[in-house]
Image: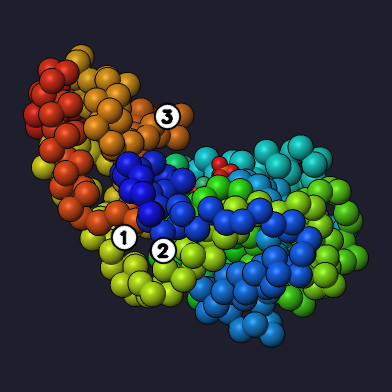
Amino acid sequence: MEKVKRNVLLNPGPSTTTDTVKYAQVVPDICPREKEFAGLMKGIREDLVKIVHGDLEKYTSVLFCGSGTINIDVCINSLLPADKKVLVINNGAYSTRAVEICKFYGLPHIDLKFPVDQRPDLDIVEKTLKENPDIGLVHITHNETGTGLLNPIREIGALVHKYNAIFTVDTTSTYAMRPINIEEDNIDFCMASAQKGLMSFTGLSFVIGNRAILEASKDFPKRSYYCNLYLQYECFEQTGEMHFTPPVQTIYATIQAIKEYWAEGEEAKWARHTRVFNAINNGLDELGFKQVIKPEWRAGLVSSAIYPDDPNWSFEKVHDYCYERGFTIYPGKISTTNTFRLCSLGAIDEDDIKDFFVVFKEALVSTGVQIPVNYKN
Ligand SMILES: *Cc1c(COP(=O)(O)O)cnc(C)c1O
């Protein structure tokens, strides 16, 4: 096996992969309609449920060919009963995406906004549910990847169930990293894609959820031909296959990635991401960078640093300096503050972060940014 140049990706996915996962894509050509291939997907579907500690009788998973956004689209358009409304609890860019999906499908919805650096106010959430008994589906993002804020899904899920709605949680940037227990966390449906926590490749996304609700959704209005959750589930249950062509090579890589997930173990993997996250925060603190989210509200996977007030600061120049040396940093996703992000996803460890900060500091020095960095207030 030839060694592939190793880049340390500090963007919020796709993440750095192992060479064994990279090479797992190189397989003899196969038609995905062969039984041999359908068998592979059955194993993945079960593993995906086990990763969130779901009981295989009660929970199931459905695979789609697409990037992570397809899951948000699928859940919202498929899980809203007739004559009901969606409530999106919105404190960031990814929940805003869910609101846009409601708009594109013309679905009745409430966009319940909170500031991007704040957790949602549970009293307001409950009041909204109480005053709107026609809310049938509540959607939230677990780790708002735009900022790194962790939302209290277990508490919100309890409220959603108290008012008899379905709870969908975008766990794309926590799944297979920060431990999740689908039942105890009061999640009806969660989601992710292979290129994030699983450290595989883009092209495979999946929704994991409550089988009884999924089966009941057979009678909900069908709003999409390609992206309907029940139709894809039915196809898997009847034939073991996706309705349309699956991402064959990504599926092989993901099988290897799941093997590596079980070999590393949930606890050890989360401990590694936490080490990386702490190393990133210490590095930023030492250089004087301020962050958007207060420490106790961070999900432990995304650090969102504020641009310093230094006339020489240029995100592009610093990015290019690091990129040429094998480290990818990423812009922020907040309209009100200029930020950049450093993420703890992927097959990296704290030594990579030490190496990164050597390069990052060089980039600041070479572009004339004062260290520690300055802020006007
Ligand atoms: C990455 C991500 C997605 C998916 O984005 P794509 O660009 O479609 O892969 C969705 N939700 C969250 C929270 C994410 O972090």
> Dot 3: what SS?
loop
State which tag comes first along the sequence, 3 or 2.
Answer: 2
> Residue 336, labelled with which disc?
3
> Dot 2: what SS?
loop
Front-most of 137 and 48?
Answer: 48
Front-most of 288 and 233?
Answer: 233
Q: x, y percentage for residue 237?
A: 80, 73
The part of the image, by quadrant, that contains residue 43 is bottom right
**Label 2: few (<14), some or many (≥20) within 10 Å?**
many
Residue identifier under label 2: 177
Residue identifier under label 1: 273
State which tag comes first along the sequence, 1 or 2.
Answer: 2
Residue located at (82% from left, 70% from top): 239
Q: Looking at the image, is mark 3 or mark 2 nearer the viewer?
A: 2
On the picture, is 252 further left or further right than 272? right
Residue located at (45% from left, 46% from top): 13
- What separation in Å lies between label 1 and label 2 (alpha carbons)? 7 Å
> Residue 34, labelled with which disc?
none
> Dot 1: what SS?
helix
Kind of residue at badge 2: Met
**Label 1: few (<14), some or many (≥20) within 10 Å?**
many
| Number of dots carrying numbers | 3
Q: x, y percentage for residue 336?
A: 42, 29
State which tag comes first along the sequence, 1 or 3.
Answer: 1
On the picture, is 42 further left or further right than 215? left
Would the CB of label 2 be found within 8 Å of ligand 1?
Answer: no
Kind of residue at badge 1: His
Q: Is label 3 in contact with label 2 (beta carbons under 8 Å)?
A: no
Query: Which colouring convention does the figure follow?
Result: rainbow
User: Image height check: is 168 above or below 10?
Assistant: below
Q: x, y percentage for residue 174?
A: 46, 59
Residue located at (27% from left, 20% from top): 317
